[in-house]
């Protein structure tokens, strides 16, 4: 009887530790879009996840999925270059602040989307891909001179 009790306890513990949709891990979907009538260069990465460097044509986007455990410090940055205008900027497209902002919009399948849109006057953030200009989009960063 004592052995049976121990066995059940171990099964329970193992099940709890291996579950990954138990509310501890959240899925995000990052979109970075070029809303400028010129191609731009974009490099995005985190400490341990290289997304890559892309030559984004007008209207194109980069998209990647990632998981975040709420106790981990997940951070992604992107560096943007608008060479025709000699402008660039680099900033964190995802960090603790955006974890909370993006988490309020559940894509419906448990995925939380975040959108960044590069425009001539700067970089806009939204949690839905609504029409631009529109109330979804907020100007967060501007371009800086190289
Ligand atoms: C997150 O990144 C933004 C830049 O996009 C920055 O202004 C903000 O301070 C960062 N938040 C945290 C918690 O690091």
Image: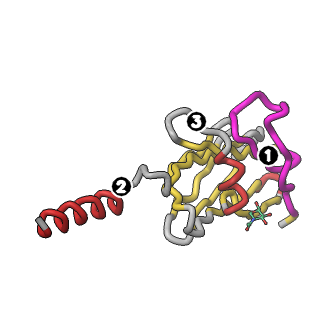
Question: Compared with residue 25, is residue 128 higher up or lower down, i.e. above or below?
Answer: above
Q: Nearer the viewer, mark 1 or mark 3?
A: 3
The crowding category of the residue bearing disc 3, from other C-alpha atoms within 10 Å (few below 14, some 14 to 19, many at least 20), is: some
- Where residue 124 is drawn, which disc sits there? 1
Query: Which element type, helix, strand or loop, lies under badge 1?
Result: strand
Q: Nearer the viewer, residue 131 or 89?
A: 131
Q: Nearer the viewer, mark 2 or mark 1?
A: 2
- Where residue 19 is drawn, which disc sits there? 2
* Residue occupying the point 82% across, 59% down: 87
Considering only order in the chain, which callout, 3 or 1, is on the residue closer to the N terminus?
3
Q: Nearer the viewer, residue 133 or 107?
A: 107
The crowding category of the residue bearing disc 1, from other C-alpha atoms within 10 Å (few below 14, some 14 to 19, many at least 20), is: many
Quadrant containing the N terminus is bottom left
Q: Nearer the viewer, mark 2 or mark 3?
A: 2
Judge left or right: residue 131 versus residue 139.
Answer: left
Picture coordinates of residue 99, whole percent (x, y)? 65, 55
* Residue occupying the point 51% across, 64% down: 50
Judge left or right: residue 96 versus residue 49.
Answer: right
* Residue occupying the point 67% across, 47% down: 102
**Within the magenta stretch, is there residue 5?**
no
Picture coordinates of residue 31, whole percent (x, y)? 62, 44
| Residue range corresponding to the magenta coloring | 120-144
> Residue at label 3?
107
Picture coordinates of residue 81, whole percent (x, y)? 73, 58
Picture coordinates of residue 146, whole percent (x, y)? 83, 67
For marks 1 and 3, give the CA distance.
19 Å
Q: Nearer the viewer, residue 16 or 84?
A: 16
Question: Compared with residue 58, is residue 7 higher up or lower down, i.e. above or below?
Answer: below
- Where residue 95 is drawn, which disc sits there? none
Query: Which element type, helix, strand or loop, lies under badge 3?
Result: loop
């Amino acid at each position: 009887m004592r052995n049976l009790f121990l066995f059940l306890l171990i099964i329970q513990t193992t099940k709890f530790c291996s579950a990954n949709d138990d509310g501890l891990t959240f899925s995000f979907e990052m979109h970075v879009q070029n809303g400028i009538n010129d191609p731009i260069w974009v490099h995005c990465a985190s400490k341990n996840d290289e997304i890559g460097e892309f030559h984004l044509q007008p209207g194109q986007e980069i998209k990647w999925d990632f998981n975040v455990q709420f106790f981990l410090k997940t951070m992604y940055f992107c560096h943007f270059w608008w060479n025709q205008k000699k402008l660039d900027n680099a900033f964190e497209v995802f960090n603790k602040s955006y974890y909370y902002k993006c988490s309020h919009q559940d894509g419906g399948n448990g995925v939380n989307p975040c959108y960044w849109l590069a425009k001539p006057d700067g970089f806009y953030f939204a949690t839905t891909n609504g029409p631009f200009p529109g109330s979804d989009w907020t100007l967060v960063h501007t371009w800086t001179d190289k």
